[in-house]
Image (tube, helix red, strand yellow):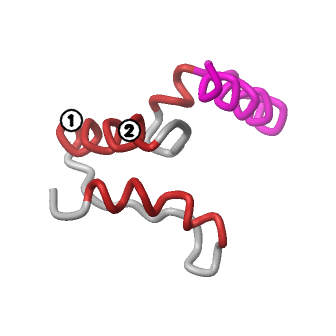
């Protein structure tokens, strides 16, 4: 499972930097991480909106070239 592997790598780096252990599953479920396929992220953002009332996110910086990666997610959520 690629998202779980990416989350595990991130959890390891966070633990090394902060000394705080966190599971890969917790990283995936965190509202502070966006790891997964477009459908997974659309579902995650809808769940966060329903559960916590979170309806806006700051994703990267406006000049970040990686911002294009989130465009398909934004397109699917647009108007919902």
SS class, disc 1? helix
Choose between 34 and 38: the one closer to the eye: 38
Inspect the magenta stretch and tell me whether residue 14 lies in it: yes
Residue 66 sits in quarter: bottom right
Residue 18 in picture, x, y percent from top left: 76, 36
Residue 42 screen position, x and y as percent: 34, 44
Give the left or right position of residue 38, taking residue 65 as reference. Answer: left
Image: magenta residue range = 1-24
Query: Dividing the image into 4 quarters, which one contains the C terminus?
Result: bottom left
**For mark 2, does the 10 Å Cα neighbourhood hold few (<14), some (14 to 19), or many (20 or more) residues?**
few
Name the residue located 41 percent from the left edge and 35 percent from the top edge.
Answer: 40
User: In x, y percent, where is residue 33?
Assistant: 53, 43
In the picture provided, is 60 more to the left or to the right than 5? left
Disc ID at residue 51: 1
Residue visible at 52% across and 30% down in the picture = 28
**Is label 2 in a helix, a strand or a loop?**
helix
Q: Is 34 rendered above or below residue 30?
A: below
- Name the residue carrying label 2: 39
Residue 50 occupies quadrant: top left
């Amino acid at each position: 499972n690629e998202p779980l592997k990416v989350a595990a790598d991130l959890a390891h780096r966070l633990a090394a930097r902060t000394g705080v252990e966190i599971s890969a599953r917790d990283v995936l479920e965190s509202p502070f991480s966006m790891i997964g396929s477009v459908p997974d992220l659309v579902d995650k953002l809808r769940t966060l909106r329903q559960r916590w009332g979170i309806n806006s996110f700051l994703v990267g910086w406006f000049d970040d070239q990686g911002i294009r990666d989130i465009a398909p997610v934004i397109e699917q959520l647009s108007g919902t």
